[in-house]
Image (spheres, coloured by chain):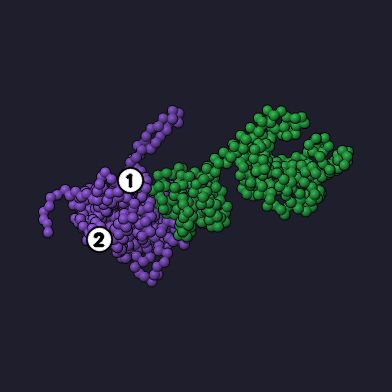
Chain colours: A green, B purple
Amino acid sequence: MKERDFRAKWEAEKAIYDAWGAYVLETVKAALVAGEYDLDCFLKIPAKYRLKNIDSLVDKAFYRPDKKYTDPYKEIEDKVGVRFVVLLLNDINIVQKIIEHNTSLWNFENCRHFAEDREKHPLLFTYQSVHYILRPAKDIAVGAITIPSSIPCEVQIRTLLQHAHAELTHDHIYKSKKTVKPVVQRTVAKSMALIETTDDFFSEAMKKLNDGPVQEYGIVERLDGLYFSGTDIKSHNQKFAVVLLDAFEDLIDDQLIEKIQLFLVEYDIIYGVIKEKYKEHIVYQQSVVFFLYWLIRNKQCRLLKDWPFSMEILDLLASDIGVSLRNW
Amino acid sequence: MHLLNFTIDKIIIHQIYRKDDEGNRVPPTQSNSYTKFDSAAMNEFKTRVRDALGVKSSAVKMEVFNNDDSGLPVLVDNMIDQDEDTFAVSSYDIAQKLTEAQNSKSMPGGIVVIFSGRDGIEKKKFLGIIKAEIHSAYQKMVNPKTKEISLKFVKEVLLTPGTRLYKTAAFFENPEYDKSSADLKDKWTVMVSDHQMSSTSWKAAAHYFYSDFLGCGYPESSARTTKLFYDSAKSFITDLEISQVEKNDLYNALNIHLKVKKSGTISLSGFAEEYFEEKYHDDFTGYMEGAGLPATDFVKDTAYVEKELKQRRVKFTSNVRVVGPTDAFNDLVKIEEIKSDPDQPETSETWTKIIIKDRISKQE
């Protein structure tokens, strides 16, 4: 294919690539929202899709000494790309799962993963990212445009630190047209080694932060389950729940949920109370309210000693279940 | 279990008075209209009721003894289904009955709050009575300009959170009962909260309220409940992971609490607070409730444990025993754990050093 034909074909198909990029972006974002991730918080840089500029496409197809294509238009798969930048290595897995589980929408090709790069080149510290190429599983109609199953879209997933490295080096090192001096390469490699170390420390810190009986026994998820099954309402947990579980962490064990379930058999009136008073106070909107009722009834001495909020909340709940609070 | 998701629909208040100087009863002042609280005041009122009568409160379960037409239980039984106007009139009869029951000049006047409501999933009815003494207090005042705080003396306040200045009782309709029974104790459960019941001079001070006025008495099961308390508390102490010396102190405390203390009621939380370290408080109340003890206070009746309370016994693995009267054991016997070889504490045996602050009077 000549450069002129390349340019003409791109002009003709640009709108299709544009539609496919938008489709991939919105699908992943919708899945994150469905998984209750706050996009503004989870994605450290607002996710966008972008079409490659025609001049850099032509440059990549015909004028790069390191690229030898037989059919450059077909072989260049990043004509449209979407990038997701997250905070932690674990967050990358979350986006990966979304991509790999949506096989009814697209076929994916896992074409780059830093974990494999590290395996193959353990002594090398260089650009790190996760790359996929997605093509529609079958032709997809988006408005007036039909996206054929041959159209690729590159998805990049990185941590914020990996992204920082890429931002600094991409145009200057990876795509550099002149030979980069060893001292520069060494400096960049050192920074990547540092970034990899820091990413690991971040993950370790988060793991330790989230390590405890609440996580180990899935207390929040199981309370949410009890809440939904008893009230038909989804729990809206807030910071209140975290503080409360933290304050009484030592009372949390593998038996706690069973104890609360037994308690709720006796106090089944609580489900009705929650529905009735849902708008009265935020405490009723959070599944941790069951734990709190249980504490009022069964661990009152301890509860009153370490209660981190105003007594008004305890008074409300104690009145619901007719438990005296003034006997200690 | 009472007061689950309870609501209060009627509140009416009358005033009663202390006997005059000649010892004559002064008729109560009648109120003809209901008290309407805004939601904050109602929540606070419910808090008072819940704290006085709810689970874990110091309320005691009583039984209706007086089934006479002129007694309070029959009046309550009639009132519960009355329309608003009739209920208001009948409620004054309650104030009159309380005036009637106050047979001593030392008994103060105050207000009588009569309220009714519903509780539980089945929305069962209940009728409550509070006798609140009027006392004085201070109100915080803030100067809007200088923001300076001052206190204004308020001569008459009542129903402040401390429960010492009011007595509360409520008749709760039982969810299930024999409808053909004429005995009101089958239909109603009565809870009474009166700090005088747990005080040392409780008998006379509390009797007029729960018996003369309310027409109630102790449940027949009090002696059984007290024995269950004694046995379960002993098991709890036995299972505690503490030293034998500490256990000895707790067994002593248990016997003294039941035998010597003059209080008329037993409180699980009160007992825990008095004798156990704080970390065991919730465990103790939970253990005792699990053993079948009520979650509120109960009347102390030591009839079934008299014999056990008389003596404290300590038995050793070798069958050696130390036995003594509870009071003397507590005052004169000191027990200490020692090691057979203090220089090798890890490998040596545990022995017991007993000091009896007395001389031997006889040997066999």
Mark 2 residue element: loop
Q: Position of residue A250 (x, y in %)?
A: 44, 47
Please give the residue where the numbered disc 2 appears in the rendered image. Answer: B305
Q: Which mark is residue A126?
A: none
Q: Nearer the viewer, residue B364 or B41?
A: B364
What residue is shown at x 40% (from left), y 32% (from top)? B149
For disc 2, the chain is: B
Disc 1 from disc 2: Cα separation: 41 Å
* N-term mark: 1 or 2: 1
Q: Where in the figure is residue B174, as x and y percent of width and height? A: 40, 63
Q: Are marks 1 and 2 in contact (CB under 8 Å)?
A: no
Please rate how many residues cluster around mark 1, counting C-alpha atoms within 10 Å: few if below 14, some from 14 to 19, many from 20: some
Taking depth in this image into account, of A83 and A245 the one nearest to the observer is A83
Classify 10 Å Cα crowding around label 2: few (below 14), some (14-19), many (20 and above): some
Amino acid type at mark 1: Ile
Q: Position of residue A257 (x, y in %)?
A: 49, 55
* Type of the residue with mark 2: Val
